[in-house]
């Protein structure tokens, strides 16, 4: 934008100056010619008036001195052509122009070499009319024109540079204000809802900055309301969870009561975590977690239920930790959703596996990455299956796969489903920096 503004200003200024300066240069040239011609005419008339009485008195020496006094190295060539053809002063030849001037006419005409000749008759000579001739060479005729043109060119260049300077300052102001707005929008997109734009630049950009600030404030208000609503809804779950805990305590089978109480405690922790996450600002980042450790922990959590259903569970994870930039609770929620889908939507006795393997990316995804794969030996996904929020082919809410997908993609990873046979779900995570 700044460069285009400079180019537009430079081109416009150059065109305007060309329209003004070209006629002005022609005018200075014509003015120089007129000035030189007028000075030569005045010189010729002065010589004619000075030598007229001397010619009448036949004072040849005085006539010669008068002609020589107006000749010099830096002066036009002045000569006096007597009636008999004698030339006093600068050498010249008798031409038709001289003969015409002897008839009593004073005039100026262009010489064949490009200069000009000024001829003035001298009346009163005893033997006929003499003629004063002043010759202007082309260099003397256009004396000062080049200097005037250089001055005009300098003025034009100066005006162009001044216009470019003003355009650059204006462009810098516009670009700076635009970049400030873009930076504010980028911070808002990154989750910093405290970002506000400083109104600067022309009125249009100031208006945009004000509207952007209003939009940011409105988004902040809406998200705060949504977080509070989510926290309130999660808090309302405490009552039925407390009822479940009391029911678990009344069971006569101590082992069963202990198991159900543990599940209820885990549910209470999940509800508390939902409340904390709902009230956590978006700009506040949570620490990452070890993907392999979370996979082992969640597989162990679901193992009792899987054994009750007669399922075989295979867990394969690397011995060394593999940290990813995803909080442990989000990893656990994604893995719980995938394992829950297996337990809910495959026949009892269907085996499944949870594996974590590390890979080295290439091409557009360089660096070390980890893959979390949950695979079962069931019938696989329906033919019209799509991992979209609210879309399900088995009568469920359709949120489980979407939770897993968003967990991977928001961390900069990927999501993939495959029937090979059975359902295979792969989550890819980049290593934490």
Image (cartoon, rainbow, N blue to C red):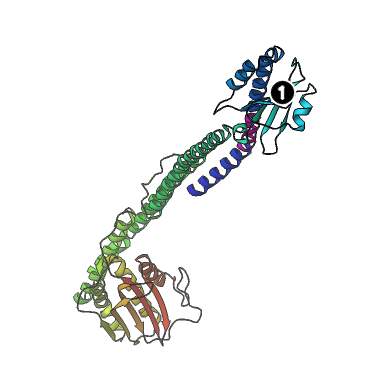
Quadrant in which residue 358 is drawn: bottom left
Residue identified by numbered label 1: 82
Please tell me whether the stretch drawn in magenta is mainly helix, strand or loop. Answer: helix
Task: Work out whether 212 lies above or below 92.
Answer: below
- Rendered location of residue 67, percent (x, y): 62, 21
Helix, strand or loop for disc 1: loop
In the displayed structure image, the side of residue 361 where residue 207 appears, left or right: right
- Rendered location of residue 203, percent (x, y): 51, 38
Quadrant in which residue 52 is drawn: top right
- Rendered location of residue 306, percent (x, y): 29, 82
Mark 1, Cα crowd under 10 Å, few <14 / some 14-19 / many 20+, is many
The number of numbered badges drawn on the structure is 1
Task: Work out whether 96 lies above or below 176.
Answer: above
Depth check: give the residue in front, 93 or 106: 93
Residue at 56% x, 40% y is 13
Q: Quadrant of the C terminus?
A: bottom left
Task: Work out whether 186 lies above or below 379.
Answer: above
Residue 5 in view (yes/no): yes
Residue 250 in view (yes/no): no
In the displayed structure image, the side of residue 371 where residue 219 appears, left or right: right
Query: Which residue is at the far right?
Result: 103
Residue at 78% x, 28% y is 99
Depth check: give the residue in front, 211 or 19: 19
Task: Work out whether 88 lies above or below 190.
Answer: above
Residue 180 in magenta stretch: no
- Rendered location of residue 310, percent (x, y): 30, 87
State the extent of the magenta-drawn residues as a range. Answer: 20-33
């Amino acid at each position: 934008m700044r460069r285009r503004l400079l180019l537009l200003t430079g081109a416009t200024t150059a065109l305007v100056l060309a329209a003004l300066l070209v006629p002005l240069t022609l005018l200075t040239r014509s003015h120089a010619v007129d000035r030189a011609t007028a000075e030569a005419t005045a010189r010729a008339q002065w010589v004619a008036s000075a030598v007229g009485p001397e010619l009448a008195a036949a004072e040849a020496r005085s006539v010669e001195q008068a002609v020589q006094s107006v000749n010099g190295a830096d002066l036009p060539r002045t000569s006096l052509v007597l009636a008999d053809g004698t030339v006093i002063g600068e050498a010249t030849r008798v031409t038709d122009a001289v003969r015409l001037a002897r008839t009593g006419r004073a005039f100026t005409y262009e010489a064949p070499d490009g200069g000009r000749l000024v001829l003035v008759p001298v009346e009163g000579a005893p033997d006929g009319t003499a003629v004063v001739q002043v010759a202007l060479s082309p260099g003397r005729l256009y004396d000062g024109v080049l200097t005037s043109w250089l001055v005009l060119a300098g003025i034009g260049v100066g005006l162009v540079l001044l216009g470019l300077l003003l355009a650059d300052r204006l462009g810098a102001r516009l670009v700076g204000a635009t970049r400030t707005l873009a930076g504010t929008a980028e911070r808002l997109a990154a989750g910093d809802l405290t970002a506000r734009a400083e109104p600067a630049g022309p009125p249009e950009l100031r208006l945009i900055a004000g509207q952007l600030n209003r939009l940011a404030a409105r988004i902040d208000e809406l998200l705060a309301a949504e977080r509070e609503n989510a926290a309130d809804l999660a808090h309302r779950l405490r009552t039925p969870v407390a009822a479940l805990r009391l029911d678990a305590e009344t069971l006569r089978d101590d082992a069963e009561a202990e198991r159900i109480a543990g599940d209820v405690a885990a549910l209470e922790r999940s509800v508390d975590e939902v409340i904390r996450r709902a009230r956590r600002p978006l700009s506040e980042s949570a620490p990452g977690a070890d993907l392999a450790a979370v996979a082992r922990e969640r597989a162990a959590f679901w193992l009792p239920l899987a054994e009750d259903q007669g399922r075989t569970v295979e867990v394969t994870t690397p011995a060394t930790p593999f940290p990813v930039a995803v909080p442990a609770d989000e990893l656990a929620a994604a893995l719980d959703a995938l394992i829950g889908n297996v337990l809910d939507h495959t026949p009892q006795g269907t085996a499944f596996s949870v594996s974590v393997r590390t890979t080295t990316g290439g091409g557009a995804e360089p660096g070390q990455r980890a893959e979390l794969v949950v695979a079962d030996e069931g019938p696989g996904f329906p033919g019209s299956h799509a991992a979209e929020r609210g879309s399900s082919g088995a009568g469920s809410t359709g949120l489980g796969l979407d939770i897993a997908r968003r967990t991977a993609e928001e961390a900069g990873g990927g999501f993939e489903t495959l029937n090979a046979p059975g359902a295979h779900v792969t989550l890819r995570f980049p290593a934490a920096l």
